[in-house]
Image (cartoon, rainbow, N blue to C red):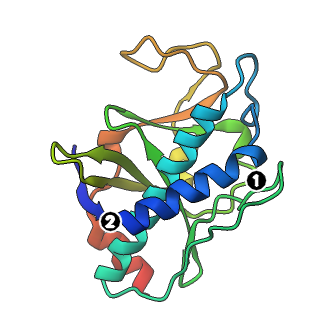
Amino acid sequence: MNGIPIYINKFEYDSCVNFAVNSIGNQRELSFGQKGESRGEKEMYENTLQGKLGEIAFKKFLDISELKGMSLDFEVYPKGQWDNGVDICVNKINIDVKSVKSISKWFLLEVNKTELITSDVFVITSLRYSDTGNTYIDLKGFTSKSKILSQPVLKRGECIPNTGCKLKTDNYSMPISSLCSNWSLLLDKLSD
């Protein structure tokens, strides 16, 4: 499932790089509920860059779809503060844009974060570099908060199915292939 490719231009990419660099000192070394191995600065930078690129791509998708006027938050919050999982709000619908690796087959949502998240919808994206060096974000699909919270929980220490990757905390789990990819459904809901 490749999704809808959204081209990221140099200005957009550089804006995200600057945001990621400026955010490093304010990131948590351990995510909510995570135990053991902490994230290094490189991982924090990569996670932040990929996430912000996903936000830009989804906003561009909304702009192309005639849902204009939303702005993105490039504020760097003090350590321990964050945006409560709302990256974009359209007509009172809170959207959290999540980015996964391009090879990921699963959308994982940390159980310990769910009480703090006020989003109604999760949009899943992935970063892809083309052979020509261009940057693309693929819009993989979306799901409601209620649907991801009804999915099975993979426990800390268990492996993500069909991988050797052990989880650092408990996660709700949904196959990427189970995400809704009928974007007109989401656009219709956001247009109401």
**Whether label 2 touches label 1, CB < 8 Å:** no
Q: Which mark is residue 9?
A: 2
Report how far apart the C-alphas of labels 2 and 1 lie in the structure. Answer: 33 Å
* Residue at 41 percent of width and 68 percent of height: 11
Q: Amino acid at mark 1?
A: Leu
Position of the C terminus by quadrant: bottom left
| Residue 95 drawn above or below residue 114 | below
User: Is residue 56 found left or right of 74 in the rendered image?
Assistant: left
Q: Position of residue 50 (x, y in %)?
A: 47, 48
182 or 26, nearer to the observer:
26
Q: Position of residue 110 (x, y in %)?
A: 64, 37
Q: Earlier in the sequence, mark 2 or mark 1?
A: 2
* Residue at 83 percent of width and 49 percent of height: 79
Q: Amino acid at mark 2?
A: Asn
Quadrant position of residue 104: top left
* Residue at 29 percent of width and 53 percent of height: 135
116 or 145, nearer to the observer:
116
Label 1 residue SS: loop
Q: Which mark is residue 116?
A: 1
Q: Position of residue 179 (x, y in %)?
A: 35, 49
Q: Which mark is residue 145?
A: none
Position of the N terminus by quadrant: top left
User: Is residue 112 found left or right of 100 in the rendered image?
Assistant: right
Q: Position of residue 85 (x, y in %)?
A: 65, 58
Q: Could one spot residue 98 in this view of the protein?
A: yes
Quadrant position of residue 123: bottom left
Quadrant position of residue 19: bottom right
